[in-house]
Image (cartoon, rainbow, N blue to C red):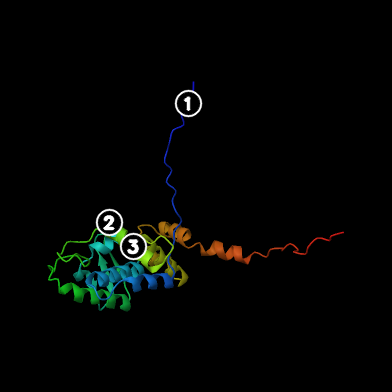
Amino acid sequence: MAYRKSKRTVTQKRPPEPLTQAEVEALLRICSVRSATGIRNRALIVLLWRSGVRCAEALAIRPCDIDREKRTISVLHGKGDKARLVAIDGWALTEIDLWITIRARWKVPPSATLFCASSGAPLDTSHVRRMLPGLARKAGIAKRVHAHGLRHTFAVRMREEGMDIGFISHQLGHSDIATTVRYIRHVAPTDAIQAVHAIRWSNPSLKKPSSR
């Protein structure tokens, strides 16, 4: 009796692809500063890059959630609907405030989410999934560019800066520090890379053999 082999589609998980500083800057340059949507997209990219929040978290933020004096943003609808306070730097706030100034011209309701359409309707994550690859192609970036990749980029930078793992865990919104440790090792396996670089290899001779 012949048996048929079952056809199963195996989804291969790609390794994380954090962006370099130059790649993020190229992405931002592609966002037109002469259009409202370009300024909005730029502010969203900066927020994802400089805070490490998830895409859905960023799209749920409202202008009233931003504290400019303390340079913090209240993420009220994190994973599992958990709230947390995240830090944001002054330059990122400047980019966000520029968008808020442009957004005011649309006369959207004050209750509208920070990143919205001209009608005041909130942006959907599917919009970001389409937007980022399109901008990446225009910027000449060969890597896959997506919102979670910007989160990876943030985590790598925090790791390089030697930030306390507890702070990184809170900023990323992980409920368990062990999750952050696994996340960092997956995204930025710095220790393993340094260990390989530190190996003292015995190099083989590259002399050509005698022709006798």
SS of the residue under disc 1 = loop
Q: Say which quarter of the image contains residue 192.
A: bottom right
Q: Residue furthest right?
A: 212
Tell me: residue 56, above or below residue 44.
Answer: above
- What is the secondary structure assignment of the residue under circle 3? helix
The residue under the point 78% across, 63% down is 208
Residue at 67% over, 65% down: 200
**Position in image of residue 71 (x %, y %):** 28, 75
- CA gap between label 1 and label 3 equals 45 Å
- To which quarter of the image does residue 133 belong? bottom left
Nearer-the-camera pick, 184 or 209: 209
Residue 134: numbered disc? 3
Label 2: which secondary element:
helix
- Circles 1, 3 touching at the beta carbon (< 8 Å): no
Residue at horizontal 84 percent and vertical 60 percent from the top: 211
Residue highlighted by disc 1: 3
Looking at the image, do the residues carrying marks 2 and 3 touch, with CB atoms under 8 Å apart? no
Q: How far apart are labels 2 and 3 at the CA level?
A: 13 Å
Which of labels 1 and 3 is toward the front? 3
Give the crowd class for mark 2: few <14, some 14-19, many >=20 residues within 10 Å. few
As measured in the structure, the alpha-carbon distance from the residue carrying label 1 to the one carrying label 2 is: 41 Å
Query: Which quadrant holds residue 126?
Result: bottom left
As shown in the figure, which amino acid type bears the numbered disc 3?
A: Gly
Viewer-closest of 41 and 85: 41
User: Quadrant location of the C terminus?
Assistant: bottom right
For badge 1, the amino acid type reads: Tyr
Q: Position of residue 16 (x, y in %)?
A: 44, 59
Checking the image for residue 126, the label placed there is 2
Say whether disc 1 or disc 3 marks the residue closer to the N-terminus: 1
**Disc 3 crowd, CA 10 A, few/some/many (<14, 14-19, 20+):** few
The residue sitting at 25% across, 76% down in the picture is: 34
Q: Position of residue 41 (x, y in %)?
A: 28, 68
